[in-house]
Structures are given as structure tokens and as C-alpha cells.
């Protein structure tokens, strides 16, 4: 590898050719401030339009200041990253950005987590020397994401995520000059677009322009209503990230403290989505085996590969973009919706309360789950199976609001019966996890033999597209895994073209899977955080006494006393769903969400 | 053209056509046919003559008689008097403003005397829609010479020796650029002609494409030969329909003659040219933005390096030059680098085309040797300031350039001198201003332009220019303070230093140069709340001199907001509260009774 | 090419012919993404403007996102989503015209028609836009109504020019 040597702030550094000045500076401990730049190393995601001009440095011999994030380090370069000229310019630029930004920090959802705010603090900005007209845009409130483009600083990160990473193509820079902004076509609402609500735009927005739709107020009202029984479920990825909001090291598992906090917040039953994940495996795994056996028996009507259907953004993506493939995904509902269906039917019956008086709240790493819960097919007489969805971040706000000292809480258990789960369900939170859980069960059901080894290393990893072949006692099962919708698109195009080699495919919309969801604590571009969360998930799996979904005793009991068997009529009715062609009609999905915030 | 006894050249440039030039042409042709003279005498619709001020213009060869402001109705007289009887039509001759004498032919016009036409060599002489006329004037000889007798290295060496520099504004050495693109290794390379001329008040490139499209085609093919490209693209403004039409005709003709396409002149060299249309974005004059636009994207520039020579159109090495640069290539090859470099100054060789406009007598398109002074251009060629007013400033370089005062009139026109003086060469717009022009307003005008044309990608340009404009607006409305002047200067320097592309890096130049050269005028605006040029409306008041007013009521009738009252035959008065300062009354008053206080 | 326009919903109904024409243009450019701007030019020259429905159709034909098409349409000032008036008035705002008083002319037109740049009068007769430079600097300030060029326009001429078109019989009818 060719190396180049350069000097940054009088420090000499040798770096491989192709390294940027920004990266070279970091090597010698010079942290050049950035704003628009974002690089998620092991996910191959990079946004560097070189537009914010915050990372400008002085390069000897060049007339103008140069953006360090896009300037390649060359041999003999002499760089000053903090000369008076640089500091004055950088500060003026931040002042300019602030001069076109609402001064609403106190009430902004992003306050305390805002990169622009941090920059302003770092630069000690006390007054703005420039002021004038500010950009004004209509606020866009979708069921999952709120766009407040008055706050947009044109870093273009969301545009990169939406187009290059997710290939959803809903967002684009529009207009030009002072009027430019990132927007859906015709400045329509997200709700009227092909947005999947994957929330990756929210995950990377450095400011408060893109945020989740906050439902903490509605949950508080439900909790304080004595007529309601409030049940909560928490998704697997939440426990691997929630601690970050309370200053804990990334990758710290806080399952017990989370259960304790939820109990203190006043939820009547603290359950676990993981239970529903086990249930999903029963249905989806059975469906896989059913399709597989029929296929092996020569039934040409059967569709293979089977696609996982846990991720609502992914489901919406296929509905918009591949309407001809709607019979390919498993018909199994997502764990959140399975939980809701079991809670509002089985559990409500058990408690002998009307489903309308039972409030189901989900804690999710995801913003698309807010949309999923509002889909018409998941409601009975207008009463949704899941009433409210809070993101990991919103839960942390609730805990802080209730003045609960999270870090000193004792570890507590989930309530039973819907708090019982296996290691298989925990790994649903990471890319590769759903399919591994499915394989653990399907293998034993198919071969009627115990697994020689529970963990499938070949299904794990962080590459966007992976594949593996699992030996089902002589039957080679070809498995594909994609995370990030851009990667998913590639697999779907293969299927559409009839070139797919796979029997089963797992798809998650977010880079890293749910651990990198749009509702998780902000990673601020540090992709190692995702890796640590992933490790935490696998650690939780290892800790579980039972690690295969079909061995979950409550699952067994539930089929025994209520559902019959997997894919029975009752299971179909409660646990399976159907998909809709949304390729032409970008109309509203009949979300009842506008009103239920006021519950 | 020699087959005819006489040639009547009718200017077919956009300016002259706009003022009925096309009808004039039709009229001349049909009258000649009526008289049965069509075999003897030819009417040619040419490219721009340059003398746009007095359009439509007609020139008669061989005696160079130059008729100005010719209407279709004058056609009959030209045929009957000049063509048939051999008598010049006196009332159509150009009248020299100083002497008041009629000038019999173009050779005696000051406008043309100091000009040297290299890029414009064929404009106004040939029919741009006829390739034979181009070929008759050494057309495609340079290409033949390059393909047949020279290696690409030799051609590049010749261009480098000629020291031709980019005419688009920045003045980068053309030969070096070609060499860089040649050295980039790739399976495919591209030659791009930047014809997205966008400076407000500039029409050099358009005139060349309208008047001599083949010279650009020929040069692009030569460039393709040099850098190893078989494909060329012309990125042209969609607002130039005539240039597009003539370019398309020229491309077809060149293909028919085997001068474009496969195996050109049996040398094994292939070259084809396509058109790509601009769509009204000034920033696309910046080469990376232009390339993105050609790729069907938003024309947002990207950071250089990588330069287009390494990674350009579709990621392939691309050579981008502007129209005028290309137009200089064939003469350099034909006449040699030595001849070319003998013209001009030490560091700026050859000539430069300017679109001379504003408060000047001879508005038009001119080409002068580098080193010609601004004074020569404005007074000798341009005929001085209109209406006997006093010269105040000359603006070069468009929105990226600056305004120079009369102290700079003896500045020789070359890249370095203009930059040193606080302006720049730019692509060739030259706007002359007189005592009535307010320099704060001029700066604001240019800022408004850049504000409109900023792509919005980088913060200094998107927000900085907005703030700069707001400060200027405040000053021009009489609300500015001295502190505003400091902020104006500080922010201008930041925008220059920190912007992503050339647009933002130069956009504060009109502010900085007017502040440098007309500081007093800025001070007058902020300290005395006075606009010395009387242009800033917020600070002026229209008044009627009761001694001069005859009470004719013309002003009160023209006033769009009924701000003027008064009885018939008695002095009128303007209500300053209602008055919108449109100036219509002053324009209308026959007694000079209305003035600005 | 006519398209029916439902003013109430700001929706346009594309006729079968219109759809076929747009598809044909896309095919002519080989459905190439890189030809988007050329395609938009070709389509706008047929319809006079680029309503949302047409942009959606182009996006579908080229298999690119409609946001991208809209992003391009709104970047370039030549493209418009509003139908122009029967008599589109454009004013040159090049520097030469500016120093010869184009701004006053522009203001006068705005005042006379009670519309801003980029707008069309409610009766659909006039629309107003400013151009960068038409290159007729010798005639500055220059105003165009359709293809017709008016040179050396004085402020007082504006009302006269407009009223001629309002009366439906401009003394200088458009060329062609």
C-alpha cells in the first residue's frame, strides 16, 4: 500500500494513499469538527457532500480553505486545522447556519442530542452576527415520522440513506439556493409517498428536522386512566441499547432494569415481545417447512424462497416496489402484531376485560412499528391490537420524566405468561437472527433430531448481503440474508427475474437489523456502537436456559389451550396477515393515528 | 461568394433578428427575385456583425457599405438605389457620433478599426448554415492537418506553445488541460463544450455558435484526436434556439461531408458530437456541475480534485472548454503558435471577445487583442458614454467580477491585470456604467443574481449570500449602519474563502470591488441616508418645480397610483406618501419640471 | 398538446394521447436516466409545462424515483409546473437591461397585472417571468411577449403593450 506523509498542526502523520485529511488528522489526535459528514465504516455507508464547510482547514499553497472530509491527503501537505483564519471562518459558518435555524432548542426533540447544538456549544457562540429571513416549510406529520424542515441544514444524510442505502427514493433535494430543502416529490407528505418509515433518515439526522412521532403523552394518559389495563411489550433490540440513554457503555444489556423501570412507570403487565418472536418462529417455521416439503414433492404452485415478514418497513417496501411478489413473504404477522393479537384476544379473555379497556403499548427500536400498528388489518372494529408504540428513545424520556434512577434499579423479571421467551427470540434484534431462530426450530422439526450445535456462525455478521447453506440432514437449505433495503432490493430483483437460488431469505430494513433501528439511541455516526449492540444480543441468547422457540413452555401451552397447532384456522385468523399492492396508490393507509394520540 | 457580383450580408444574430432582421432578409430576397437579379446578387444571412447597437445591420460586399437600423421597408430602396443604380442609401449609413458625418463603409468605422478577429473571424462574413462557406475560409483545414500530419502530442505542444488560456473565465492553460486529459488512462474519454453561457449581459458564445458553428465542431474533433476521445458533447443553453438550430445544421453537414463520424478523412479517427441542453442554471457553467447536469442530475458542483480530466462525465476523463476557447483552436493550427502568441501580452496571448453593453454608445460584440486598454475599448470602439453622461465604472467578469473606476481605464485587458485591479476577465461581459448608476444597487443586483443561481449545496453560498443581500438591501433602503459595512466586508471574505465552487468563491467580488472603489458612496448611504446616484428609491423623493410646471396634467394622468394632484394649468404636486417612485411622471414631463430630490 | 386541468384539485387528467406521447418521448431517449433533462425539455415543449402527473409518468418510464425527477425539475429555472399564460411575458434581467432600467419595467408589469414573477393571471392571459439575458443588449431594456421582442421599452409603454393584448388584437401580432 502506498503511504503518504503530511503535517497537520505541526504533527507529522503517515497514512495510506486515499485517506482523507479528516481521517489523517484523527490519527494524530486532531478532531476536526464536522457536521454533514457521516461514515458508518463496516456498513459501507458514507455521506460527504462537502457542503456544510464546518471541517474546513488551511492547506499551504491553496488559495481557498478546503473541506477536510473530501480532501485526499497527499505527500508533503502542510495543514492547519485551527488557525485564526480557520476558526473565524468555521465559527461564521456555524453562525450562518444558526441564522437560518429556529431558535427552539428548549422544546426541540433533539435538544441534547443535536450535532448543531454541540457545535455551537463547542464554539462558544453567544450571539449571532448575522440574521435575516429564515426558511419556512410546512410541517409534515406522518404516523411514524415528523418532518420539520425549518430545521433542515441540508447535510443530505437523509437523502443518502433514503436513496443510496435504502433505495426507497422518497427524499430528494429540491429547489435551489436558499430555498433548497430535502423533501418528497411535490413537497407532498410522507404519508402520500412510498416512504417505508424505516426511519433511517431519523437515525442520521444531525438536528431536529426528522424525528419520530412522539406518543409518550398518550401513553402517560393511558397509564393514569384507572379504567384501563395497560400491557407493555419490549422488542429484543431495546434491551441492548436503552442503557446508552443513561450513560452506560454501548452493548450493556439492561433487560432487568428495563422491566423494573416499566413496572415503576405503572404498566400493569410487563411482557416481552420475545415471547411473540417465539410464536412467530412457530408459524413462520411451519410455513417454511410446509412450502419446502410441498416444493420437494413437486408442487409447482408453491412459492420459494420464503421471506421473513417481521419488519414493517420491509413489508411496505415490497408492497410499493414489488407488487408481483406479494405472495412470496411469509404470511406470519410480525412479533409486535402477534403479541397484540394474543393480548387483545387470549389475554383479554383470560383477564375477562373488554379488549377496548386493554391498552397494549410496544417499546420498539423502530419508527415503522408506529405505522404498522395503525394498519387497518390489525384492528377489530376500529380497536387496534397495538395501541401505542414508543421508541427506545421515547421510553428513556418517560423514565427520565418519572424521575426513575435507572442505573440503580434492581434487575427484575418479566411478568408471566407473556414474558416467557427463549434465546432464539432475543436474536431477532440483529441481522441474521430471525433466520437463525427459524433454522433452530425448522431443523429439529424437519429432521426430528436435536441440533448438534445451537449457534450458526455462518448466518451471523455485518455484511449487507450474506448467504449460507445449512445441511438439513442431507437437504442443503440455501439461505440469504439482507439488511438495508438496498441490499434487499437486489435479492428481490433476483426473485422477480426467477434467478433466486434461495429457499429462505431474511430481510431487515435497517443496517445491522433492529439494533440499528430508527428508534434507537442515536449512534452519531459511530458504527462500532451497532457492533456492540449485536454482541449484547448474542450474549443474552447464550444466557437463556432455553434457546429454541419450539421449546418455550408457554408457547406450547398457548397452542394446547387456545390456538390448536401452528397454521391452524385460529392461528391463521389471529397470527397471519395479507399484503396489499401499493405500487400506484400512494394514498393514506387508513391510519387511525391522528386521533389516538389524544386517548 | 465570389460567383456573385454583389453580396448583401444581413445580420442574422439574435439581436438583429429580434428587431425585424428576419423580415428584412425575406424582403430582400423576394425583391431581388422580382427584379430577376437572384443569379447575380446573393443575400446572405450571417452571424452577428457585432454592432448590435444599431441593428438590424446590413453590409454590402465588395465595397463594405454598412447600413444600420435597416427596416424591412428599406429593402426596396437598397435594391433600387444601391444595387441597381449604384448609389448608397444615405439615410441608412452609420453616422459617426463625434463628427456627425456619415461613414461610407465599415472599414472607416472606429468600432471595427481596433478590433482583431480570431474567434469571430467568420462571424458576419459567412452563412453559418452553409458548410461550403466555412470550408472556403480554411474551414476544416486545421483538422485535416492535425489528423494527417501531426501526432496528438504535436498538436498539444502547438496549443501549449500558443499559450492559449481558457476563455471561460479562469484562464487555465488549454494545452495543459488537454495534456492532463490525454494522460488519464481510460477506455472512454469525452470532449465537452461548455456553451451554457450565463453571465447576465454576455452573449459571446452564442454569437460564435450562431455565426460560425463549424469552428467549434472542428476544434472539438481536434481535441478528441488529442486526448483520445471519440465522443463530444455540447452543453448548450436551451434558451439559445437559433444557436441550437445552426449547430444542428452544421453537425449534419459535417457528417455528410465525412468530417464527423467514423474514419474521418480516412485517417481511422472516429468522432461524433451530441447536444445536451442546459435548463437555466447558471451554476452549470462550473464544470463539475455541468457534468452532473449532463448526466441528468441536479447541477450541483462537487469538490475538485478529482478534476474532470481524471474523473468527469460518467466517471471518465473529460476535457471541458468553452466555446470561445475552441473557436481559437483552428486558427492556431492553421497559422501557427508563433503567430498567435505574437498577439497579446506576456502572459495573456491572443484576443478576447467581449459583449460590450450598458451605458455606452456602441453596444455590441467585439474582439480585441489582449493588452488593449479599457479606455480604448470604451471610448474608441464603444464610442464613449451614452447621452453625454460621465463614465463611472466598468464591470467585467459578470457576477464573479468587479467594478473598476476611471482610475483603472488604462488597465490593459489581460487575466493578471484585471485580477490585480480587483476584477477579473470572466467570460467576456463588459458593462459600462454612468453617473446615474448606484454602486450599492449594482452590487445588490449581482448578489440577487447569485442568490437566485446558488445551487444551495454549501452553507456559505446558500445562507451567506442571502445575508449579504439582506445587508445590501438594508443599506439601499436607508437603514444601514457603519456596523453593517463591517459585517458586509467580513462575511464577503468568509463566503469567498469557504464556498464549495467558483460561484460562491467569487460571488462577493462585486461587493468587495465596489466597496474598495466607491467607499464614499456606501458611506453616503449609511451615514447621510443619501444615494448619490439617485437610484435608491427609498431615499429619494420626486418633486415638481412649480416654476417649471405648466399644469398640463400629463404627469397626473400617467401616475399609476394617482399621487399627483393639481388643477389644470396650475402647478401640480406629488404626494410623497402615495408616490411609489416609479419615475413615470419624470419620464413623461415635457418641461423638465420633475426632479429627484 | 392539451391536458385537462381540474383547477379545484390541482390535478390534471392525462389523456390517452398525452400518456402515449410522454411514453414515446421516453422511448426515443432509450429510457436513459442520463437523458432526464433532455426528456423534460422534450415533454415541456409539447405540453407547455410539467404537471406532477407527467413527472410521475416519466419517473415510472425511466424507473427512477419521482422525487429525483421533481428535484431536477425544481433545480432548473427553465422547467415549470405551472401552465404559462396565453401571452407569456418575459423580461430580460441581464445587466445591460438592468442598467437601462429593466427593474422599473418589471415592477410596472407586476403592478399592472397584479402578479409576481413565475405567476399567471387568474384569467390565464398573462404569465410573467424574467430571463437571464436574451442577448439583445443593443435593444435594452428588452421585453418579450411570446416570441415578439419589444426593445427600448419605457415604463409608460407597459400599460399600452398589455392593453393591446388584453384587447385581443396586439398591434404587433406574434411572429410565425
Image (tube, coloured by chain):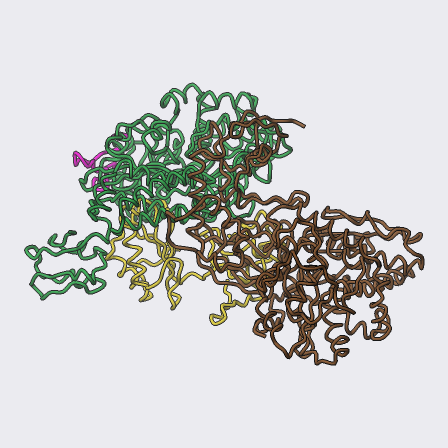
Chain colours: A brown, B green, C yellow
* Number of marks: 0
Question: Relative to B326, does residue A441 appear above or below in the rendering?
Answer: below
Q: Which residues are magenta?
A: B86-108
Judge whether residue A162 can be spotted in this image. Answer: no
**Residue that extends furthest to the left in the rendered view of this protein:** B547
Towards the viewer: A399 or A236: A399
Residue A22 among magenta residues: no
Q: Position of residue B267 (x, y in %)?
A: 60, 27
Q: Position of residue A253 (x, y in %)?
A: 71, 54
Left or right: B440 in relation to A547: left
Left or right: A278 in relation to B318: right
When asked about the image quadrant of residue B396, the answer is: top left
When asked about the image quadrant of residue B32, the answer is: top left
**Residue that extends furthest to the top in the rendered view of this protein:** B338
Q: Position of residue B4 (x, y in %)?
A: 37, 34
Left or right: A421 in relation to A591: right
Judge whether residue A288 can be spotted in this image. Answer: yes
Towards the viewer: A55 or B560: A55
Left or right: B381 in relation to B592: right
Towards the viewer: A556 or A303: A556
Q: Which part of the image, by quadrant, shows the N terminus of chain B? A: top left
Q: Position of residue B402 (x, y in %)?
A: 33, 37
Residue B89 among magenta residues: yes
Amino acid at each position: 500500500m502506498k503511504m503518504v506523509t503530511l503535517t497537520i498542526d505541526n504533527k507529522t502523520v503517515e497514512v495510506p494513499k486515499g485517506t482523507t485529511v479528516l481521517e489523517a488528522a484523527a490519527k494524530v489526535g486532531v478532531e476536526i469538527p464536522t457536521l454533514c459528514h457521516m461514515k458508518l465504516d463496516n456498513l459501507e455507508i458514507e455521506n460527504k457532500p462537502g457542503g456544510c464547510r464546518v471541517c474546513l482547514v488551511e492547506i499551504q499553497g491553496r488559495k481557498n480553505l478546503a473541506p477536510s472530509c473530501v480532501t485526499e491527503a497527499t505527500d508533503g501537505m502542510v495543514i492547519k486545522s485551527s488557525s485564526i483564519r480557520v476558526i473565524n471562518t468555521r465559527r461564521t459558518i456555524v453562525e450562518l447556519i444558526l441564522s437560518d435555524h429556529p431558535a427552539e432548542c428548549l422544546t426541540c426533540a433533539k435538544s441534547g442530542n443535536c450535532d448543531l447544538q454541540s457545535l455551537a456549544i463547542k464554539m462558544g457562540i453567544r450571539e449571532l452576527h448575522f440574521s435575516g429571513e429564515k426558511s419556512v416549510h410546512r410541517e409534515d406529520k406522518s404516523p411514524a415520522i415528523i418532518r420539520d424542515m425549518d430545521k433542515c441544514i441540508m447535510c443530505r444524510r437523509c437523502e443518502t440513506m433514503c436513496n443510496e442505502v435504502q433505495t426507497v427514493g422518497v427524499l430528494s433535494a429540491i429547489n435551489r439556493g436558499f430555498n433548497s430543502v430535502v423533501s418528497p416529490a411535490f413537497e407532498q407528505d410522507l404519508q402520500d409517498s412510498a416512504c417505508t418509515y424505516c426511519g433511517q433518515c431519523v437515525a442520521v439526522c444531525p438536528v431536529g428536522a426528522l424525528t419520530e412521532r412522539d406518543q409518550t403523552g398518550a401513553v402517560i394518559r393511558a397509564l393514569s386512566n384507572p379504567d384501563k389495563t395497560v400491557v407493555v411489550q419490549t422488542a429484543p433490540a431495546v434491551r441492548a441499547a436503552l442503557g446508552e440513554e443513561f450513560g452506560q457503555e454501548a452493548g450493556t444489556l439492561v433487560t432487568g432494569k428495563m422491566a423494573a423501570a416499566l413496572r415503576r412507570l405503572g404498566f400493569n403487565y410487563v411482557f416481552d415481545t420475545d415471547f411473540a418472536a417465539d410464536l412467530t418462529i412457530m408459524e413462520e417455521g411451519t410455513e417454511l417447512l410446509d412450502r419446502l416439503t410441498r416444493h420437494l414433492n413437486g408442487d409447482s404452485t408453491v412459492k420459494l424462497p420464503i421471506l421473513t415478514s417481521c419488519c414493517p418497513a420491509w413489508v411496505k417496501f415490497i408492497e410499493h416496489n414489488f407488487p408481483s411478489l406479494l405472495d412470496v413473504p411469509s404470511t406470519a404477522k410480525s412479533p409486535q402484531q402477534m403479541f397484540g393479537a394474543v393480548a387483545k384476544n387470549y389475554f383479554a379473555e383470560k383477564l375477562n376485560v373488554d379488549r377496548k379497556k386493554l391498552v397494549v403499548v410496544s417499546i420498539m427500536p423502530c419508527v415503522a412499528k408506529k405505522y404498522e400498528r395503525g394498519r387497518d388489518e390489525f384492528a377489530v372494529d376500529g380497536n387496534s391490537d397495538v395501541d401505542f408504540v414508543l421508541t427506545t428513545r421515547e421510553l428513556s424520556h418517560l423514565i427520565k420524566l418519572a424521575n426513575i434512577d435507572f442505573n440503580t434499579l434492581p434487575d427484575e423479571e418479566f411478568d408471566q405468561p407473556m414474558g416467557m421467551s427463549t434465546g432464539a427470540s432475543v436474536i431477532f434484534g440483529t441481522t441474521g437472527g430471525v433466520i437463525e431462530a427459524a433454522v433452530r426450530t425448522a431443523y429439529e422439526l424437519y429432521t426430528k433430531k436435536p441440533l448438534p450445535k445451537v449457534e450458526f456462525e455462518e448466518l451471523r455478521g455485518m455484511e449487507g448481503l450474506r448467504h449460507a447453506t445449512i445441511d438439513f440432514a442431507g437437504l442443503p437449505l440455501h439461505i440469504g440474508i439482507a439488511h438495508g433495503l438496498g441490499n434487499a432490493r437486489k435479492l428481490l430483483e433476483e426473485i422477480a427475474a426467477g434467478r433466486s437460488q434461495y429457499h429462505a431469505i431474511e430481510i431487515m430494513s435497517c443496517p445491522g437489523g433492529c439494533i440499528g433501528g430508527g428508534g434507537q439511541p442515536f449512534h452519531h455516526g459511530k458504527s462500532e456502537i451497532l457492533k456492540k449492540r449485536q454482541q449484547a444480543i448474542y450474549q443474552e441468547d447464550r444466557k437463556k436456559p432455553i434457546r429454541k422457540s419450539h421449546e418455550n413452555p408457554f408457547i406450547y401451552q398457548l397452542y394446547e389451550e387456545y390456538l390448536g397447532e401452528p397454521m391452524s384456522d385460529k392461528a391463521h385468523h389471529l397470527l397471519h396477515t395479507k399484503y396489499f399492492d401499493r405500487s400506484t396508490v400512494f394514498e393514506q393507509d387508513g391510519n387511525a393515528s391522528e386521533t389516538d394520540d389524544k386517548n | 461568394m465570389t460567383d456573385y457580383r454583389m453580396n448583401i450580408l444581413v445580420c442574422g444574430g439574435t439581436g438583429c433578428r429580434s428587431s425585424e432582421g428576419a423580415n428584412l432578409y425575406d424582403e430582400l430576397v423576394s425583391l431581388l427575385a422580382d427584379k430577376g437579379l437572384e443569379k447575380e446578387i446573393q443575400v446572405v444571412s450571417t452571424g452577428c456583425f457585432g454592432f448590435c447597437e444599431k441593428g438590424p445591420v446590413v453590409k454590402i460586399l465588395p465595397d463594405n457599405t454598412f447600413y444600420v437600423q435597416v427596416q424591412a421597408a428599406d429593402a426596396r430602396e437598397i435594391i433600387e438605389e444601391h444595387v441597381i443604380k449604384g448609389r448608397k442609401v444615405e439615410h441608412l449609413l452609420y453616422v459617426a457620433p463625434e463628427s456627425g458625418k456619415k461613414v461610407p463603409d465599415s472599414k472607416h468605422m472606429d468600432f471595427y478599426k481596433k478590433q482583431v478577429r480570431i474567434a469571430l473571424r467568420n462571424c458576419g462574413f459567412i452563412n453559418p448554415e452553409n458548410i461550403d462557406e466555412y470550408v472556403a475560409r480554411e474551414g476544416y483545414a486545421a483538422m485535416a492537418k492535425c489528423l494527417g500530419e501531426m501526432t496528438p502530442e504535436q498538436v498539444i505542444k502547438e496549443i501549449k506553445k500558443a499559450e492559449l488560456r481558457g476563455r471561460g473565465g479562469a484562464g487555465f492553460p488549454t494545452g495543459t488541460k488537454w495534456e492532463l486529459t490525454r494522460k488519464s488512462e481510460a477506455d472512454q474519454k469525452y470532449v465537452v463544450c461548455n456553451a451554457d453561457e450565463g453571465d447576465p449581459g454576455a452573449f459571446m458564445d452564442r454569437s460564435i455558435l450562431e455565426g460560425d458553428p463549424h469552428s467549434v465542431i472542428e476544434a472539438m474533433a481536434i481535441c478528441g484526436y488529442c486526448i483520445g476521445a471519440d465522443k463530444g458533447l455540447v452543453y448548450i443553453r436551451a434558451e439559445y434556439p437559433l444557436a441550437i438550430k445552426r449547430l444542428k445544421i452544421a453537425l449534419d453537414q459535417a457528417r455528410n461531408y465525412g468530417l464527423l463520424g467514423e474514419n474521418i478523412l480516412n485517417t481511422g479517427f472516429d468522432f461524433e458530437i451530441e447536444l445536451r441542453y442546459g435548463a437555466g442554471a447558471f451554476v452549470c457553467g462550473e464544470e463539475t456541475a455541468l457534468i452532473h447536469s449532463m448526466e441528468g442530475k441536479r447541477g450541483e458542483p462537487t469538490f475538485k480534485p478529482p478534476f474532470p480530466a481524471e474523473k468527469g462525465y460518467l466517471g471518465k476523463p473529460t476535457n471541458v472548454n468553452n466555446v470561445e476557447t475552441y473557436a481559437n483552436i483552428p486558427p492556431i493550427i492553421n497559422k501557427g503558435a508563433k503567430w498567435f502568441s505574437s498577439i497579446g501580452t506576456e502572459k495573456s496571448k491572443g484576443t478576447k471577445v467581449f459583449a460590450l453593453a450598458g451605458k455606452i454608445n456602441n453596444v455590441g460584440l467585439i474582439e480585441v487583442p489582449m493588452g488593449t486598454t479599457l479606455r480604448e475599448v470604451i471610448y474608441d470602439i464603444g464610442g464613449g458614454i451614452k447621452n453625454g453622461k460621465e463614465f463611472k465604472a466598468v464591470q467585467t467578469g459578470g457576477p464573479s467580477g468587479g467594478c473598476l473606476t476611471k482610475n483603472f481605464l488604462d488597465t490593459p485587458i489581460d487575466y493578471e491585470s484585471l485580477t490585480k485591479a480587483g476584477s477579473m476577465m470572466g467570460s467576456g461581459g463588459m458593462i459600462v456604467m454612468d453617473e446615474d448608476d448606484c454602486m450599492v444597487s449594482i452590487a445588490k443586483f449581482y448578489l440577487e443574481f447569485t442568490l437566485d443561481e446558488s445551487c444551495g449545496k454549501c452553507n456559505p453560498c446558500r445562507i451567506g449570500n442571502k445575508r449579504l443581500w439582506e445587508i445590501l438591501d438594508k443599506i439601499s433602503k436607508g437603514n444601514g449602519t457603519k456596523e453593517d459595512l463591517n459585517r458586509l466586508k467580513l462575511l464577503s471574505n468568509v463566503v469567498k474563502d469557504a464556498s464549495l465552487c467558483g460561484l460562491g468563491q467569487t460571488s462577493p467580488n462585486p461587493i468587495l470591488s465596489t466597496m474598495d472603489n466607491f467607499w464614499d458612496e456606501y458611506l453616503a448611504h449609511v451615514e447621510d441616508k443619501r444615494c448619490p446616484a439617485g437610484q435608491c428609491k427609498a431615499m429619494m423623493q420626486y418633486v415638481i418645480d412649480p416654476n417649471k410646471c405648466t399644469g398640463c396634467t400629463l404627469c397626473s394622468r400617467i401616475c399609476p397610483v394617482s399621487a399627483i394632484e393639481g388643477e389644470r394649468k396650475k402647478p401640480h404636486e406629488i404626494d410623497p406618501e402615495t408616490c411609489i417612485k416609479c419615475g413615470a411622471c419624470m419620464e413623461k414631463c415635457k418641461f423638465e419640471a420633475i426632479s429627484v430630490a | 398538446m392539451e391536458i385537462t386541468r381540474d383547477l379545484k384539485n390541482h390535478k390534471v387528467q392525462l389523456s390517452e394521447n398525452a400518456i402515449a406521447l410522454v411514453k414515446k418521448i421516453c422511448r426515443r431517449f432509450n429510457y436513459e436516466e442520463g437523458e432526464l433533462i433532455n426528456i423534460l425539455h422534450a415533454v415541456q415543449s409539447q405540453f407547455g409545462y410539467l404537471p406532477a402527473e407527467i413527472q410521475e409518468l416519466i419517473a415510472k418510464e425511466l424507473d427512477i424515483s419521482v422525487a429525483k425527477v421533481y428535484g431536477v425539475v425544481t433545480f432548473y429555472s427553465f422547467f415549470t409546473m405551472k401552465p404559462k399564460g396565453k401571452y407569456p411575458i418575459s423580461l430580460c434581467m441581464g445587466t445591460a437591461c438592468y442598467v437601462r432600467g429593466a427593474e422599473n419595467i418589471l415592477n410596472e408589469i407586476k403592478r399592472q397585472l397584479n402578479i409576481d414573477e413565475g405567476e399567471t393571471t387568474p384569467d390565464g392571459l398573462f404569465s410573467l417571468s424574467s430571463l437571464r439575458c436574451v442577448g439583445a443588449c443593443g435593444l435594452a431594456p428588452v421585453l418579450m411577449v411570446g416570441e415578439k421582442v419589444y426593445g427600448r421599452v419605457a415604463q409608460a409603454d407597459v400599460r399600452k403593450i398589455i392593453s393591446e393584448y388584453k384587447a385581443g388584437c396586439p398591434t404587433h401580432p406574434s411572429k410565425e
